[in-house]
Image (cartoon, rainbow, N blue to C red):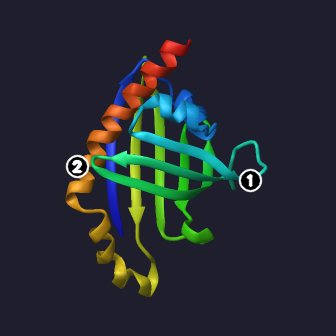
Amino acid sequence: MLTVQSKVAVEGLTGREVTDFLLDARDDRYQAWWPGIHLELHPVQSGHRDDHVGDVLFMDEFIGSRRVRSVVEVVESVPGERVVWQARPRGRRVPVRLTLEVRDGAGHVELRHTVTAGWSGRGAVLDPLWRLYFSRSFEQAMERHVRTEFRRLRDLLRASA
């Protein structure tokens, strides 16, 4: 199993604001969050649940110089605490998950952004292949990206309040 994890604390932001923003996926809001870097985030299929579990989204953004496009499904959602998306290229789930966990502190939110990739059982023998995509340079770019984007989200939400 491969894990790419970033942690950041952001003053003046709450976990509920983060999860609500991400679950209310709309291109215009996503693009305003980080113009030129965040390109698209919108639903392609509704899970028909208030917690958004089952929603399928298209995401398109730059992580460093790499353009990352993916179709993901919300597989877990606890407002103000956690959202888990699973990759679904070509309509089939693959063992790649993005988990965002948030915890409110005194005047700030602590975020843990984790990408996991890998199989269980016999398929685990193929896990080293994930390193071809999730390289060390990608990990470093992701760390910079996460640290920047959530501070930008706070600024966006405060500017529109």
Q: Position of residue 69 (x, y in %)?
A: 46, 56
Q: Nearer the viewer, residue 5 or 104?
A: 5
Residue at (36, 47) in percent of width and height: 62
Q: Is residue 54 visible?
A: yes
Out of 9 and 140, give the one closest to the viewer.
140
Image quadrant holding the N terminus, namely bottom left
Residue at the far right in the pictured view:
48
Compared to 130, does 99 lie above or below? above
Residue at image coords 54%, 38%: 81
Q: Which residue is mark 1?
A: 47
In this picture, residue 97 sits left or right of residue 143: right
* Residue type at numbered disc 2: Gln
Q: Which mark sits nearer the N-terminus, 1 or 2?
A: 1
Residue at the limit of the structure toward the front, as seen here: 36
Circle 2 sits in a helix, a strand or a loop, which is it?
A: helix
Q: Residue at x 49, y 28 (%)?
A: 32
Name the amino acid, label 1.
Gly
Mark 2 lies on residue: 140
Is residue 135 positioned above or below 5 on the image?
below
Q: Position of residue 33 (x, y in %)?
A: 46, 30
Q: Would residue 27 be found to the left or right of residue 95 on screen? A: right
- Residue 113 image offset from top left, x and y in percent: 40, 46
Q: Are marks 1 and 2 in contact (CB under 8 Å)?
A: no
| Left or right of 16 in this view: 50 | right
